[in-house]
Image (tube, helix red, strand yellow):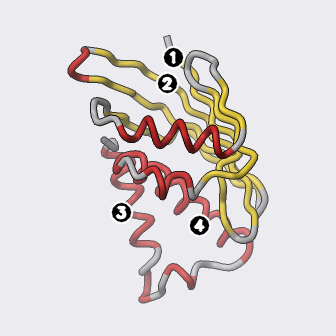
Amino acid sequence: MATRNIAIALVLAAGAATVAGTSASAAPDGARGCAWQFDTAVARYVATTDARDAKAFNALVHPDVVGVLPGGSTLVGKPAFAGFIERFFARTDWTQTFTVKHRAVDGCSTATVLFESVYSEPAAGYRQTLMIGITWTREHGRWLVLHDQNTVVE
């Protein structure tokens, strides 16, 4: 379940697409436009996780993605990463919150977002706080997840 901060970010991203009657296709040009598109991609990352929409989530993933799970296991390449996401999202016994702690966009090439996240399995009484660092690259006009690092906060 998304936190209030992410819900606000999603509302802002949706609102940005319709400011002054413009559509998402009328996003700002240049670096400002790339930053706007990045914020939209980050909002999609959170929304697709909250909805457990593996197909939409995996559409955000670069073919050469590397994922690092909290225990240190790695997922290299989109097939391995996407397969994990499909299995993970198929489960319904968990919730996860995301709070943006930092974001940086370097023009129209790379960007990063750092989330503080709480992963919970309520029925099992399990709760884990994570810092999730995601590095994105922009290819063919789309922001894609290149590296997804999950680190346990103790």
Count of numbered labels shown in the rendering: 4
* 147 and 4: which is toward the camera: 147
Neighbor class of circle 4 (other Cα within 10 Å; few <14, some 14-19, many 20+) is some
- Callout 2, which amino acid? Leu
Residue 26 position (above or below residue 79): below
Q: What is the CA distance from the residue labelled 2 to the residue labelled 4?
A: 26 Å
Q: Quadrant of residue 81?
A: top right
Q: Give the residue number, with chain letter if any, for mark 2.
A: 130
In the image, 139: left or right of 114? right
* 152 and 105: which is toward the camera: 152
Tell me the number on the disc at residue 153: 1
Helix, strand, or loop for circle 3?
A: helix
Q: What is the CA distance from the residue labelled 4 to the residue labelled 3?
A: 14 Å
- Callout 4, which amino acid? Trp
Q: What is the CA distance from the residue labelled 4 to the residue labelled 1?
A: 30 Å
Q: Closer to the observer: label 2 or label 4?
A: 2
Q: Earlier in the sequence, mark 3 or mark 1?
A: 3
**Picture residue at 73% right of the left edge, 60% below the top:** 138
Q: Earlier in the sequence, mark 2 or mark 4?
A: 4
Residue 46 on image: x %, y %? 44, 49
Tell me the number on the disc at residue 128: none
Q: Give the residue number, with chain letter if any, for mark 3.
A: 11
Q: Give the residue number, with chain letter if any, for mark 4.
A: 36
Neighbor class of circle 3 (other Cα within 10 Å; few <14, some 14-19, many 20+) is few
Q: Earlier in the sequence, mark 1 or mark 2?
A: 2
Q: Earlier in the sequence, mark 4 or mark 1?
A: 4
